């Protein structure tokens, strides 16, 4: 349930929805990496200039100043997680379960977040929680060729998308696209 603090957000929907996850997916209790907090404890979105814990080439995607459920996260030291940087070889850990920071923040001063993990679980991601670049044409091609899976990868923004990072291998695939519309995608999670 969203804890709306501003009446202008009363119609905001959760951007990640479980379709088939009752036995296939596991919520993992994780901690936000310290790099996602300012010295005063407020949220700080990952920027393209960041080098720790992951070097980034682009700012992480934010909605109303914060991260959204469905963004791909990578595990850092211990139980901490950070928004994936879209680089080949960086292992995706799962999908963020919470709104973090900004006007939709569900955490407040807490650093505990949920991460959804589980191969063969099926999820619906609502726009704008995915990178739409080339998804329509790839989905159309896949449908025309008998439903060949469309692999999805972590993008530099932390969103799921079809652009493979340089020297990507099958280990870098985060999910497969099952269904596409401009307002939502359905994916089969692979991590």
Image (spheres, grey):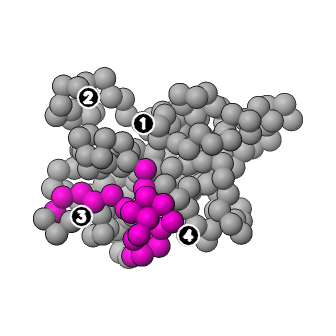
Q: What residue is at 33 percent from the left and 28 percent from the top?
A: 12
Q: Secondary structure at mark 3?
A: loop
Residue beneath disc 3 = 37
Mark 4, residue position: 90
Mark 4 neighbour density, 10 Å: few (under 14) some (14–19) many (20 or more): some
Residue drawn at (53%, 28%), measured in percent from left and top? 183
Q: Earlier in the sequence, mark 3 or mark 4?
A: 3
Q: Is residue 163 visible?
A: yes
Secondary structure mainly formed by the magenta segment: loop
Q: Earlier in the sequence, mark 2 or mark 3?
A: 2
Question: Which mark is first along the chain, 3 or 1?
Answer: 1
Residue identified by numbered label 1:
15
Residue 171 visible in the picture: no
In space, the residues marked 2 and 4 are separated at their CA atoms by 34 Å
Q: Is residue 111 above or below residue 17?
A: below
Region in magenta: 41-61
- Between 33 and 163, the residue placed more toward the observer is 163
Residue corresponding to mark 2: 9
Residue 32 screen position, x and y as percent: 30, 62
The quarter of the image holding the C terminus is bottom right
The N terminus sits in image quarter? top left
């Amino acid at each position: 349930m969203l804890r709306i603090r501003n009446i202008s957000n009363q119609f905001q929907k959760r951007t990640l929805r479980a379709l088939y996850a009752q036995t296939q997916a596991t919520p993992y209790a994780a901690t936000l990496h310290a790099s996602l907090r300012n010295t005063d404890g407020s949220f700080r979105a990952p920027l393209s200039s960041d080098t720790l814990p992951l070097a980034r080439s682009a700012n992480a995607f934010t909605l109303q100043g914060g991260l959204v459920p469905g963004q791909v996260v990578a595990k850092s030291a211990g139980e901490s997680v950070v928004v994936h940087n879209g680089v080949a070889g960086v292992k995706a850990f799962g999908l963020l379960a919470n709104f973090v920071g900004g006007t939709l923040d569900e955490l407040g001063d807490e650093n505990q977040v949920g991460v959804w993990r589980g191969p063969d679980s099926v999820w619906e991601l609502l726009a704008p929680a995915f990178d739409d670049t080339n998804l329509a044409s790839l989905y159309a091609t896949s449908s025309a060729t008998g439903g060949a899976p469309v692999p999805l990868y972590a993008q530099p923004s932390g969103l799921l998308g079809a652009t493979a990072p340089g020297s990507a291998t099958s280990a870098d695939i985060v999910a497969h696209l099952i269904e596409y519309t401009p307002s939502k995608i359905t994916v089969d999670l692979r991590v």
